Amino acid sequence: MQPTTDREAIADAANPLGLDGIEFIEYATSRPQALGQVLEMMGFRPVARHRSREVLLYRQGAMNVVINAHDSARPRSVAPGETPTIAAIALRVRDAAAAYRRALERGAWSVPTHVEVMELNIPAIHGVGASRIYFVDRYREFSIYDVDFVPIPTVDRAPPALAGLHWFGIVQYIGNDRMADWSEFYRELFAFDVLPDSERFGILPKGCILRSPCRSFYLQLIEPEPGIVDVEGEESLQRIGLGAPDVPAAVKALRTRGVEFVESSDLHSDNRGALTKSRLGGVMFELVHDERAAP
Amino acid sequence: MTRAAGFIDDFGMDTITLSGSLPAKLAAMRDAGFTQVMLKASDLTGHAEGVEDAVRVVKASGLRVTGFQVLRDFEGLSGHLHDYKVDIAKAMLEMARAVGAPLLLACSSTSTHATQDLDALARDLRKLAMLAVPLRLKIAYEGLSWGRTINEFTTAWEVVNRADAPNLGLGIDSFHIVAAKTPLDALDEVDPAKIFLVQLADFMWQEARSFEERMTTARHFRVFPGEGVHSEQVAELVLRLDALGYGGDYSFEVFNDDYQQIPPGAVAERARASALWLGEDVLRRSVPLPNAMRLRKAHAAAMEHSPR
């Protein structure tokens, strides 16, 4: 039989990277313990420490959050500030090296990595603002955390998800007239789709929603309000969206742990979603109704 | 110093026209009443106190940066030549970003090492546009009239269309249109929202037939619009762009050996006279016609009511 490639494009065009969800989300902050407290209120548990850097791994269910407080001495590296920022998204892909090469061929900026002896070299490209996008392909046969992290003694390394919480998406703030640019960026590099305006989730439906080619998470791009002249450098990953099969139940469970929610006439918790009050100068989580329970 | 009123805010100067240091050029432009400046990479790299200080000087000047030039011979290369040009492009994008430019000008390749396949050219320009996205930059692609494959705005527009990236558009230079004798009717095919920059210049010769003649003329004998023998055509171009709804910037790109030998202030005054001619006499910006108030975004709508 002849190979089909010279006749038809039969490759999985809809998901060329074999994208398969989010492996971890990384925050950068100079106050890791303060952010750790916020994460613990949200149901995450500290499970491991990085071997060589001031980096902690938190987990609940299938969600991994990394807190990076490592202050690199390298020139031009940005030291983490007090206010935690979402510094990176790690994407699960079929083949990290291939995904990385494909992204570079299409105009991504590579991030030089500086690994220590016996640590994993995880390829990364530049995302919005100072953030990065990692490609991870080892999430089935073994965990990347087994290599770079040391487990914290006595803790449960697989704490269950609170109220079925799971990754739903990430909200990105963008500048004026930048919707088309960023939509094209995510389409070109990762094959995200733009959802029609009629398809919206949760209680904060602004902007434009992009769906991952694996259909397991979303990016929501939000421009400044009309008439607002934005300031240079204000594009960033703004908040994490967590899916919950039963939002009121999740809100109740989180309230008992001390989490406060925004409750105003314009914006309040309901069956579709909820928004936690901002902590530490800007850390907030959005709950979004999503029937999928955490695995 | 106060200036006589005159509407020249749509027009700016390229630093390449003036001699002297970067601060001297910026001061001459500002003193002549200009509010924007088109920078070239060597303004930063050649600044005695270094690139970082050049960025500070530009920001302190109060002039808005029209754009940053120029990435040459980028598209159509392969293998190590392509990788090399990507590195150069990245360095220029970073400088453009640092100095607050909204766009990088890329001009069509003159290289015989580059392919002539339009789809391959488009693919490279699309990649350049994606490189520019995180830095919040646009790419204006300009067809040089001595470009090997792309040497008119018509074919440049074809490649921009094939590349189909939101932050990739056209840079239009009146010199190349006049030199290549591209019919202005072809502008009707272009989406005005995809014209990211217009550069204007006139020149002294009636014709520039060969590529060599065009290159020599373009690099040494340009003059400001209104000073040469093609002023009618430059005025016609500006009027057509205005009628199409182009609401972006015009910059004077005047390479002229004589202007390098006289004080920058005197050259900037000539630029001012040219801007006044285009702004007041050609576009009639300050004529208070009813319903002709100019707001950039609303410009296209306003045009429908504006008597011409």
Image (tube, rainbow, N blue to C red):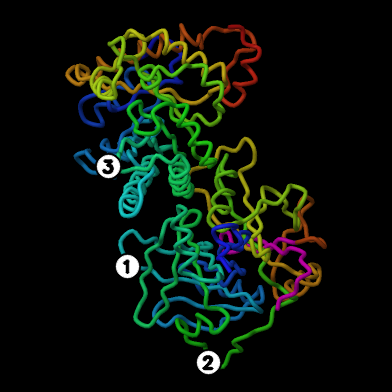
Q: In the image, is residue B136 above or below residue B302? A: below
Q: Element under label 3?
A: helix
Q: Earlier in the sequence, mark 2 or mark 1?
A: 1
Q: Are marks 3 and 1 in contact (CB under 8 Å)?
A: no
The residue tagged 1 is A73
Task: Sort mark 3 into few (<14), some (14-19) or many (20+) by Cα contacts within 10 Å.
Answer: few
Q: In the rendering, at what x and y percent does residue A294 appear?
A: 71, 76
Circle 3 sits on which residue?
B53
What is the magenta range? A274-295
Question: Are the numbered discs 3 and 2 placed on the same chain, yes or no?
Answer: no
Please, is residue B177 above or below residue A94 in the view?
Answer: above
- Residue A200 image offset from top left, x and y in percent: 75, 53
Q: Amino acid at mark 2?
A: Pro
Determine the residue positioned at 25% across, 14% down: B266
Residue B43 point in image, percent of width and height = 27, 35
Q: Is residue A26 above or below residue A222?
A: below
Q: Which mark is residue B253?
A: none
User: What residue appears at the point 45 percent right and 69 percent down from the top-left corner?
Assistant: A97
The kind of residue on which mark 1 rests is Ala
- Asked if both marks, 3 and 1, belong to the same chain, the answer given is no
Q: Tell me which corner region of the image, top left, top right, bottom left or bottom right, holds residue B292.
A: top right
Principal secondary structure, stretch drawn in magenta:
loop
Residue at the bottom extreme, as displayed:
A154
Q: Write down the residue under mark 2.
A: A153
Q: Secondary structure at mark 2?
A: loop
